[in-house]
């Protein structure tokens, strides 16, 4: 009996030592794996699609989960369902035969730019949107493929504007309670909030009970077992691939050629810490400035929205963010 007790003690001690490791870099605050294991799902939001920093943080967290624990990881990512399947299954969509076919490696395609300016798909459209196409996202794709026995990537975007409730259903169906589960998306989808006016305006199914972003349904389902990490910054550079004009982005122009804009959110200066590249704040008072992949020409600095949220668990804060570095020139 004593030997059995001692064996259990060693087992839990080893598990505790694994969980005690920290997630994050030496130049920023960390979340302990012990804390991560308190949650069924951890949402890591980005306040702008066109920044490098959110992907670097997610990638760093992912690598440490793989290298410092023996747990498997599921990533629910704001990407098309079929793109994630191409990554996991080593397939591509064959436009000639209109079916998915096997393909090892990374397929570089001819960009697809809709003549009506309704969409822009880059050279890596088989795997990621033109909005996310970048060197670091390609590195993440290769890393996921390398560790496919431990990492599952699931796309949650059904490519329609009325997609947030569907995101929730996909996550609920595929969430593995034995895994570390992440939800990577824009702040809006991760957070527990109502759809913005411009999003609701273009939503196809205007049911009163479906006027929320995905994070709202996740919070109702998992309560405090769903961790919400929203992000923000003081200043930086953001990459865009389109323009929005008019009330609620009535006219959107998609571009294959990226462009960069600077922003400065003065209200966040009080959170700047020159000794850290980023912080995980548990106290944050103020609004969030958030950007789309398109630059809102009618708004100062091109932001999509400035909102106030109180539903988060952590705020991932950067002093200065950098634009998402393109993998290809257009």
Image (spheres, rainbow, N blue to C red):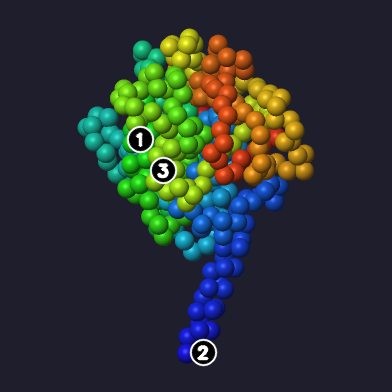
Q: Is residue 326 visible?
A: no
Q: Which residue is mark 1?
A: 165
Q: Earlier in the sequence, mark 3 or mark 2?
A: 2
Please rate how many residues cluster around mark 1, counting C-alpha atoms within 10 Å: few if below 14, some from 14 to 19, many from 20: some
Percent across and percent down for residue 67 are 54, 59
Tag shown at residue 220: 3
Disc 3 from disc 2: Cα separation: 44 Å
Query: Residue placed at 40% from the left, 14% from the top?
Result: 117
Tell me, yes or no, whether the two marked residues, 2 and 1, touch with CB atoms within 8 Å.
Answer: no
Label 2 sits on a secondary structure element that is: helix
Identity of the residue drawn at 62% across and 20% down:
261
Q: Which corner quadrant of the image does residue 114 belong to?
A: top left
Please state which of the two labelled residues, at mark 3 or mark 1, is closer to the viewer. 3
- The dot on residue 155 is none
Measured as percent of width and height from the top left, residue 214 is found at 41, 36
Can you give x and y, in whole percent of width and height, for residue 61 in the image?
A: 56, 50
| Neighbourhood count class around disc 2 (C-alpha, 10 Å): few under 14, some 14–19, many 20 upward | few
Left/right of residue 46 with respect to residue 106 in the rendered view? right
Dot 3: within a 10 Å radius of its alpha carbon, few (fewer than 14), some, or many (20 or more) residues?
Answer: few
Question: Looking at the image, which is closer to me, 89 or 21?
Answer: 21
Q: In this rendering, does residue 93 appear at all?
A: yes
Residue 178 in percent (x, y) is at: 41, 60
Of 71 and 122, the residue lying toward us: 71
Cα distance in 3D space between marks 3 and 1: 12 Å
Q: Is residue 174 above or below residue 10?
A: above
Placement of 260 over or under 321, stated as above or below = above
Left or right: 241 as drawn, with respect to 282: left
Q: In terms of sequence position, does the residue under pointer 3 or pointer 1 come before the other?
A: 1
Q: Secondary structure at mark 3?
A: helix
Q: Secondary structure at mark 1?
A: helix
Q: Which residue is mark 2?
A: 2
């Amino acid at each position: 009996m004593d030997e059995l007790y001692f064996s259990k003690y060693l087992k839990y001690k080893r598990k505790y030592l694994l969980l005690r490791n920290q997630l994050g870099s030496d130049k920023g605050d960390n979340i302990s794996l012990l804390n991560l294991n308190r949650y069924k799902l951890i949402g890591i939001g980005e306040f702008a699609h066109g920044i490098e920093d959110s992907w670097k943080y997610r990638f760093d967290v992912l690598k440490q989960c793989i290298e410092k624990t023996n747990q498997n990881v599921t990533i629910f990512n704001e990407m098309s369902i079929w793109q994630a399947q191409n990554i996991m299954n080593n397939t591509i969509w064959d436009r000639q035969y209109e079916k998915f076919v096997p393909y090892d490696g990374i397929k570089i395609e001819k960009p697809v730019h809709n003549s009506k300016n309704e969409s822009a798909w880059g050279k890596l459209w088989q795997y990621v949107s033109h909005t996310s196409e970048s060197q670091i996202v390609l590195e993440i794709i290769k890393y996921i493929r390398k560790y496919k026995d431990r990492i599952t990537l699931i796309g949650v975007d059904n490519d329609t504007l009325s997609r947030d409730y569907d995101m929730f259903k996909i996550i609920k169906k595929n969430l593995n309670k034995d895994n570390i589960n992440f939800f990577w998306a824009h702040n809006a989808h991760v957070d527990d909030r109502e759809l913005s006016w411009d999003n609701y305006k273009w939503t196809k199914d205007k049911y009163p009970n479906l006027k929320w972003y995905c994070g709202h349904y996740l919070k109702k389902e998992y309560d405090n077992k769903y961790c919400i990490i929203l992000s923000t910054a003081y200043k930086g550079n953001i990459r865009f691939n389109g323009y929005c004009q008019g009330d609620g982005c009535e006219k959107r122009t998609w571009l294959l050629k990226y462009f960069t804009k600077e922003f400065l959110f003065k209200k966040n200066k009080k959170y700047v810490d020159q000794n850290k590249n980023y912080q995980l704040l548990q106290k944050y008072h103020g609004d969030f400035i958030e950007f789309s992949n398109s630059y809102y020409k009618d708004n100062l600095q091109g932001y999509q929205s400035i909102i106030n949220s109180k539903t988060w668990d952590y705020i991932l804060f950067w002093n200065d963010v950098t634009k998402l570095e393109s993998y290809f020139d257009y």
